[in-house]
Amino acid sequence: MVFKEGLRFVKGNGSYIDDVITKEYKNYFYASIVRSSYAHAKIKSIDVKDAEKLSGVIKVITFNDLKDFLDPFPLSLDLNLEYYPIARDKVVYYGEPVAVIIARDEYIAEDAKELVQIDYEPLKPVISIRDALDSPPIHSNLKSNIILNKTFILGKYEDALRKSSIVIEEKIKFPRYSCTPLETYEVFAKYNGEEYEIFSNFQGPYTIHYLLTKALKSKVVIKGPRDIGGSFGIKSAIYPYMALIAAASRVVNKPLKWIETRHEHLIASSAGAERESIVRIYGDKQGKIYAMEMDLTDNLGAYPRPPEPGNLLRNHGNLTGAYDIEGLKVTYRAVLTNTIPTGLNRGYGGPHLYLALESAIDSFAREIGMDPLEVRLKNVIRNQNYETLTGGKYYGFSCYNVLKRMKEIYDRLYEEVNEERKKGKKVGLGISLIVEPSGTNIGYLDLARESKDYLPKSAAQDIVIVQIDPYAKVKVLVNGTNEGQAHETVISEIVSNRLGISPEDVEVTYNVDTSRPWTISSGSYSSRFTPIIIPALNNALDQLENKLLTAASELLGVQKTDLKIEKGRIRTISGDKSISLRHLVGTLYWDPTKLKGIEGGLSAIGYYQSPYADDLNNGKINSSIAYGCMGHIVEMELEETNLPRILKYYVIHDSGKILNENTARGQIIGSTFHGIEVSLYASLEYDEDGIPIYQTFAEYGVMSAMESPNIEIEHIQSSDEYSAGLGEGGTMAAPPAILNAIRSIIGKSVQRIPLYLILT
C-alpha cells in the first residue's frame, strides 16, 4: 500500500502550521518574547519606552497588561502555587517570558527585544536535586522545594524481605534532555469578543483545553494543521505560549503570530525531567528476586507544569517491569529548581524507570555470580494474564517468549564477544527487558493528590466519525494530531480491508479542531493510536458494515449471515448473488424507502473507552490500558580513545498483532535511536548560575546518521486478537542495554548517562 502521508510530502503537499497561516490568515501582528537572562531574580522594573519608540512596534506587553485576562493554570498537585505563562515580580528560570513585543513584522519584533530595559536583583539559584533538598524554597509561599513525597507499600513486602538473603543497591542518575523535533512551536491566536481561537501545532492531550479555559477565563477553540513536524511529547508543553499569545492578542485587539526559534526551543520550551533513582533488589543466591524498593526523585524545574508530576507516576502500573515479585516499596518525590519546567518526552518516565531497574537487575546478577539473562529467566512473568502489585493489567503479550528468543541470540553473541576479548578488544554485551505501556489512563495523576477532595479520573477514550458518501468513497474524521506516524495510511488500510474498497477511496481528516466532537483524552501521545483510536474506528466500521449487510440482505433476499464484503461488492458466501457497493450505497442515498429497516444513513460515530481503565484504589491503578514487551541486546566496543561504538543491535518485541509492518519498524527504529541518543550524547546541563551550558546544536548532543547503527528487529506475536502501541519502547529499553554493555567492558559501575561525557 502507498504511504499516503509520504506521497503527499514528496509532492510538496504537506500542510504544516506555517503553510496554513501564510495561506489562510491575513492582517495580523507578530509577537516576539523577551526572556529572563537570570535563573533566579527579582524584577525591580521593566522599561519599555525605547522599544515602543521603534518604528513598527505596536506595544510591549508585560504581566500588568495581561493580569485582567489571565488566571493561574490549574495544577495536578495540591499546592499553594500560582503558575502563569509570564513572569510577574520575579523570574525563576533562565528563559522565562518577561515581556512580549508586538510588531508589524517579525524582524522589528526581534530588534525591539534589545531595547527593553529590565532591572533585576539576582538571587541564588537552586539547580540540582541536592540543591533543592538543602535550600530554601524558590517560591516563597511554599514550605519546601519538595512538592511531592509519597510512599506506597504493596504486596507482601515485609514477608518478601525476610525471605531474602541478598540485597543490592543501585544509584542511577538520568539527565534532563530534549527531543529536538524538526519543527519548533508556533501559535496563531485571536479573540473575537466571545472566545479565543488558537491555531497551533499542539499535540494533545486535550486535557490541556481545560487548562486553557481556566487560565484565559474564556471559551477556547483549539485548531491545528494536518501535519506536525515532529513532537515526541514536547509539543504538549506549548500551551503556556498558547495562553500567552492569546491573551496578548486581546490586549492589542489583533490576531497575533509567534514562531519559536531553535535557540528558544532548547533553552525554554520543555525538557524530559532529570531523575535520581535508588533501587534495591532483595533476593537469594539462586537468583530469585522477592522484592524491590525504589526511591525516585524527579527535578521538575521551576513549576510543576501539568501533566507533571506525570513523569514520576505514568509508569506506576508497570513499575516492576517484566518481573514476578512478591513485594514492592516505592517512594515518589518531586522537587522544584530554577531550571526549565519539564514535561512529556518520548516514553514519559519509562526511560528513567528502566535505566534504574534494568541496571539493578544486572548488578544483582553480578553480586550472585549469575548470568544477567539467566536471572531474568528466573524471574520473568510467565502468565499472559497478570496483574502487577501496582495494579497494571498485563494481557495479550509474553515477556517470557521474548526472553527465550533473546537467549538464542545472546548465547551466540556471548561466544563471539569472548573470542574478541581474547584478541584484546574492549567489547561487551548489554541487555534489557522492559514492559512498554501504551494508551494512558489519565487517572494515574490521582496518585499525586494529597487531599481526598478531588474527582477521580479514568479517561482512556476517543471518537472516530466515518461516513460513506454517495459515490461509495469513505471519509474518516479523527480529532487528533499527525506527527509522522502514518496514521492516515493505517486507517485507510483498515477501512479498505473492512469495506472492500481501495485505500485511495478513503479520505482521512486527522487534525485538531475542538469545534468538532472530541474527548478529554484525545490527542497524539502515549502510543494511544493502536489501543484506543483503532478500536473506536472499528466500532464505527462495525456499524456501517452491519447497515450494508442488512441492506444487501433485503435487496438480494438472503440472510445477512450469508453475506460478506470484498473487492467492492457484497456477495453471498457461495458467490451466486452479489451487488456492487456503489449500487447499494446509491440505493441508500437515492431511494432509501426501498430499505425501511435501515436507519441513520451511512454515517457512524465510533466511540471507545477502554474497559481496562480504572480509578485509583489503595495505591493501585492500571496507568495504561495496553502493554507490550521489548528486549534489547547490544554489542559495544570502546575504541582506543574510549569512544563508545555500537557493533550490533537487536530488538525483540511482542505487542500483539502488527497493524502495518513498515510503520512498526519505523517507530521501533526511531524510538531506539532516541534512546541511544540520550544514553550516549544528549543532556541539558546548567552552570552554577543556572544558565544552560548547551544552547545550540553545536553543543547539544544530537545523534547523527554517522552514529546510527543498523538495528535487527524481530516481532513475536503471542496473540492475534490484541494490539498494543509500540512507539516508545526503544527509548525505554536502549539506555539500560547500553549502560549494561559499557559496564561489562570497563568492569565498574557507571552511575549516570550520557556515557560520552563520562568516557571521553
Image (spheres, rainbow, N blue to C red):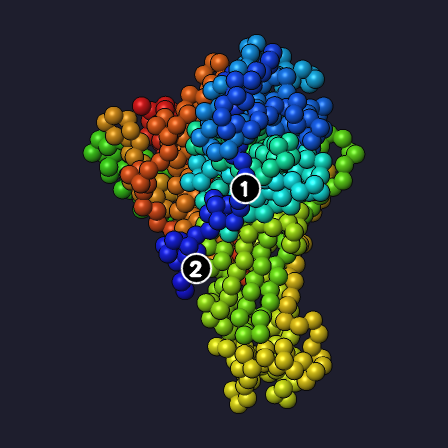
Q: Amino acid at mark 1?
A: Asn
User: CA gap, disc 2 to disc 1?
Assistant: 34 Å
Circle 1: is it few (<14), some (14-19), or many (20+) Cα within 10 Å? few
Q: Residue at x 47, y 37 (%)?
A: 184
The number of numbered badges drawn on the structure is: 2
Q: Say which of 571 and 358 sits in front.
A: 571
Q: Residue at x 58, y 70 (%)?
A: 468
Q: Which residue is mark 2?
A: 4
Q: Nearer the viewer, mark 2 or mark 1?
A: 1
Q: Amino acid at mark 2?
A: Lys
Task: Classify residue 48 by image quadrant.
Answer: top right
> Between disc 2 and disc 1, whose residue precedes?
2
What residue occupies the far right of the structure in this picture?
A: 453
Circle 2: is it few (<14), some (14-19), or many (20+) Cα within 10 Å? some
What percent of the width, then of the height, locates residue 649?
34, 44
Q: Say which of 131 and 494 sits in front.
A: 494
Image quadrant in which the N terminus is located? bottom left
> What is the number of the mark on residue 666?
none
User: Height in image: 641 above or below 463?
Assistant: above
Left or right: 266 in relation to 511: left
Helix, strand or loop status at disc 2:
helix
Q: Residue at x 58, y 71 (%)?
A: 469
> What is the number of the mark on residue 27?
1
What percent of the width, then of the height, locates residue 27?
54, 41
